[in-house]
Amino acid sequence: MLDVASGTGEAASLAIPIVGAAGFVVGADISLTMVATVRARLNDPLYWPVNADGQALPFKDGAFSAVVCQHGLQFFPDSAAGKSEFRRVVRAGGMVRRVCHIRRASVALAPDSR
């Protein structure tokens, strides 16, 4: 499984027991500080932290059975590139899940129709 914008490793820490000894979790983050922090925090042989940009992932096509991005995509300068990369590195039939927050001011609201 790939955890993009892994940050402090919250999603990865939940995924490690799920993948178990049959798999592993790769945590990709653009911040070297976050990579070092999560490496120390999770210190698990099933977790492999890497320094990588979620908009240009350094993995082969179809390399992962699942890709998650929890609260990171909204910070990508080009979120469409990130979503494209998520789809590229997940295998056929795999799962891509992302969680994002939006700011109300950034959403175009329809004019009041009253």
Image: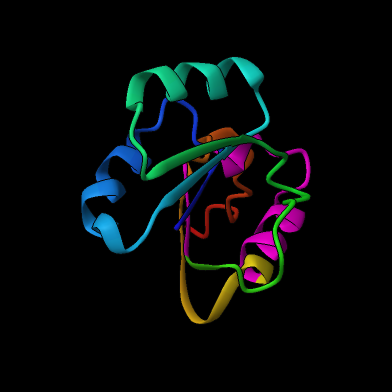
Q: Nearer the viewer, residue 114 or 84?
A: 84
Residue placed at 35% from the left, 42% from the top?
A: 11
Q: Is residue 43 left or right of residue 61?
A: left
- Quick one: quadrant of the N terminus? bottom left
Looking at this rendering, what residue extends furthest in the bottom direction?
A: 93
Q: Is residue 86 left or right of residue 113?
A: right
Q: Is residue 19 positioned above or below 93 on the image?
A: above
Looking at this rendering, what residue extends furthest in the left direction?
A: 17
Q: x, y percentage for residue 67?
A: 49, 59
Q: x, y percentage for residue 56?
A: 78, 50
> Is residue 80 part of the magenta span, yes or no?
yes
Residue placed at 60% from the left, 68% from the top?
A: 63
Q: Which residues are magenta?
A: 66-87
Q: Nearer the viewer, residue 112 or 89?
A: 89
> Is residue 101 part of the magenta span, yes or no?
no
Q: Is residue 106 positioned above or below 90 on the image?
A: above
Q: Is residue 56 positioned above or below 9 on the image?
A: below
Residue placed at 61% from the left, 36% from the top?
A: 50
Residue placed at 69% from the left, 53% from the top?
A: 82
Q: x, y percentage for residue 5?
A: 56, 38
What number of labels is visible? 0
Q: Is residue 13 positioned above or below 33 on the image?
A: below
Q: x, y percentage for residue 19?
A: 29, 59
